[in-house]
Amino acid sequence: MALDKNQIAQRIAQELQHNTYVNLGIGIPTLVANYIPKGIDIEFQSENGVLGMGPFPFEGEEDPDMINAGKQTITTMPGAAIFDSATSFAMIRGQHVQLTVLGAMEVSENGDIANWKIPGKMVKGMGGAMDLVASADNIIVAMMHTNRSGESKILKQCTLPITGVNCIKKVVTNLAVLEVTKDGLKLLERAPGVSVEEIKNATEADLIIRGEIHEMRI
Amino acid sequence: MALDKNQIAQRIAQELQHNTYVNLGIGIPTLVANYIPKGIDIEFQSENGVLGMGPFPFEGEEDPDMINAGKQTITTMPGAAIFDSATSFAMIRGQHVQLTVLGAMEVSENGDIANWKIPGKMVKGMGGAMDLVASADNIIVAMMHTNRSGESKILKQCTLPITGVNCIKKVVTNLAVLEVTKDGLKLLERAPGVSVEEIKNATEADLIIRGEIHEMRI
Amino acid sequence: MINKVVNTIDEAISGVESDMTFMVGGFGLSGIPENAIEALSKMDVFGLTCISNNAGVDDFGLGLLLKRKQIKKMISSYVGENAEFERQMLSGELEVDLIPQGSLAERCRAGGAGIPAFFTPAGFGTEVAEGKEVREYNGKPHILELALTADFAFVKAWKGDTAGNLIYKGTARNFNPLMAMAGKITVAEVEELVPVGELDPNQIHTPGIFVQRIFQGAKYEKRIEQRTVRTKE
Amino acid sequence: MINKVVNTIDEAISGVESDMTFMVGGFGLSGIPENAIEALSKMDVFGLTCISNNAGVDDFGLGLLLKRKQIKKMISSYVGENAEFERQMLSGELEVDLIPQGSLAERCRAGGAGIPAFFTPAGFGTEVAEGKEVREYNGKPHILELALTADFAFVKAWKGDTAGNLIYKGTARNFNPLMAMAGKITVAEVEELVPVGELDPNQIHTPGIFVQRIFQGAKYEKRIEQRTVRTKE
């Protein structure tokens, strides 16, 4: 059975390393914060200028001067720090933020990602995504494997304007966990009850499949 | 009679413009702060990271965490701000500091200045001088007209390694006030009792002398 | 001490003319110079180039200027919250230059800091890199980005003193300190204007040297774009 | 919260090896990491490249490392307070790279900020520009300067918390925040180490993300180089 969005987030949370700084994009990535494994210390950075982001505020305690990059009201944890946008991207560009998790409209087998523009249709802008994907050591994409028409979003080549080249390391979808290797996309895990065949059929890109592909543990 | 160092500082103080930020170098320039004309509001910047520098502290009130770029203990005025070295030079390079007053070992008639190195002999470093002279809109040099052997320090061309090219606007010495124009060094004023002839004799560079040259008013 | 206080909003925005370039601080609606924007939206200035991370919403922030078609060109990183904006852009009425958020921030800082150009990895291989010089450093391609400056920068802080020193609160800081550096004339509005000596010199975010005019805003709506809360258990 | 506290000075400087590159914060003797420098001066590490605005005095600060000839190369803007330094430099024992103070500060910041290179007007036409690319911007020649990074950055702050957040006091701030950004391992020593939650997030000068290790220094001499005073009238 394919994963739901929360389960994708849950699977990505297993990738979190102890004592690291993490930037979570809007959408599924935001949910990752709900599944931090026990014993793993993480600090969340939001590129509008906060380190040590906490949960949403209790009702009535929202502060218009305390938001995340998705413009949502937030709180901070003890040990938080606030800074300007240039310092924030100094952290990102300077690779002080170890992991970025973000959504995508398309990814390609060489690690390109497209998530900012549909020409003539949706032109909202890249926000901080281009800085994030050009910089982070580790980038994990959280996305649905296919679009609403059932077409693969994991492609030989991106068709949309790209956000970054050859930058993502892993893709976690509702069907599979994929790793970007120098030889191409390697299938690491499959969603519980989803067969390798189903994944292959849902993927336009070529997949490297070696040995037995285990089910994800959620 | 040639000016003493305090009088040079006093003459330079007449150049201060209302509501401007000023960086004073070590030596004679520091003395300029003692002669701010009435009604002229100035804030002093020191490139180690302070804006709104005040006088030296009273004895017993020195703070090792509060020094100027000459490593002297200082105080701050109400409205002062402290910042890091990159921000400090952002102010300088970004031309937010309107006037720099600094000493020199040599200046040339096209506005070059040398004040950081005597090869094989004195190699202390340029500190912030190269950033200052490359950036400030207005640069005034405070110096003695000649060295201890009586040789001119105002030259056709600098002989020492230069700190900046074609950058200084005015030179105030113990003998004269000179302006750097695109045609060369123009004699603006002479020290009280010092003749134009004496100044010409003490100057290796060519001087533009037009009309009557008035005495400085100290 | 150099006094930067202006007493009226008219004085604060005097000198603003059509076809000028403005920087406007804020991220989304957080930390935007509400009073200056409102005053500008009542002036007959048009053909503006506006450098701002976002473009406000339809009826607040820069949306007010967009509605009156005062803005000719937007330089932003994300403009997705404004329907009128999208309409003007897709119809070609509005010119839009979208640039990565980190490059936007750094280009403003560079403009204020006398750094005319720098290399960044952001945007390499994308539309953003088109026509830009590429150079490899540390085995990675980088593109050359140019500094941004503006005729006016409008910023908003929490507290400020009469010498123009500013302190921001929370994530309302964002682009404000960088744009304050890059404006030829920087106009700061604050929630609270205090005499010099009240702010700790160690805690100033924007030193007064970067600010040409300061005033206390008449009122602040501080609208929240995405009110997200959790419920007490 | 990520805990950055190390409990001993040995732990703080563990991993330091000969031939490494260090950054050391401070301006003159103000804001130097006294405890780290003293500990390094007792280690058998040599051939160091040291990036520091100044070089200490003969018997304090980096002078301690110079005396033991632990430093192979200094990258500084001003080194005029140290006789042993001058002797080693003029005799050729010590390699010295003198660079303008503003370029030094900006190169450190750039190193920490993932900006590999930038243009600055400082040094054009001088020895400093030799071999460097020149390009004109705004009618003025600029030279291309490269980012600086280091294996270790040693910085000193006034207060810090266990997450590595730092607050500096007065002009002891200087290069410390910039070098904190640029160290692969940044070791911060503080006069007072406090639990997280005690520092106001709005008032942090160096966010903890830039700091890998933090400890409270055993003692601080805080020597004054030029004691200048006025007398009460």
Image: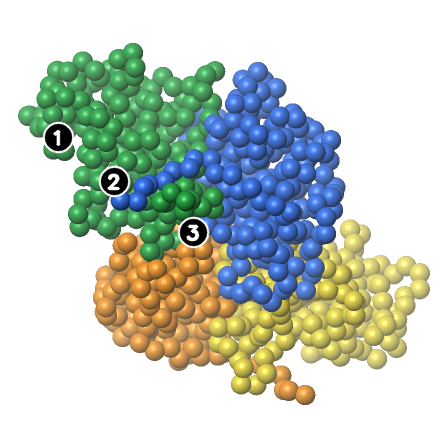
Chain colours: A yellow, B green, C orange, D blue
Q: Which mark is residue B216?
A: 1
Q: Which residue occupies the foreground of this view, D8 or B20? A: D8
Q: Quadrant of the C terminus of chain B?
A: top left
Q: Which residue is mark 3?
A: B82
Q: Amino acid at mark 2?
A: Asn
**Reading the chain from its start, which is encountered first: label 1 or label 2?**
2
Q: Which x, y percent locates residue D87?
A: 55, 19
- Chain designation of label 2: B
Q: Which x, y percent locates residue D57?
A: 53, 30
Tag count in the figure? 3
Q: Which residue is mark 2?
A: B34
Within 10 Å of disc 3 (Cα), the crowding (few <14, some 14-19, many 20+) is many
Q: Tell me the CA gap for discs 2 and 3.
A: 22 Å
Q: Quadrant of the N terminus of chain B?
A: top left
**Reading the chain from its start, which is encountered first: label 3 or label 1?**
3
Residue B216 in which image quadrant: top left
Q: Residue at x 57, y 16 (%)?
A: D91
What element does badge 3 sit on? Answer: strand
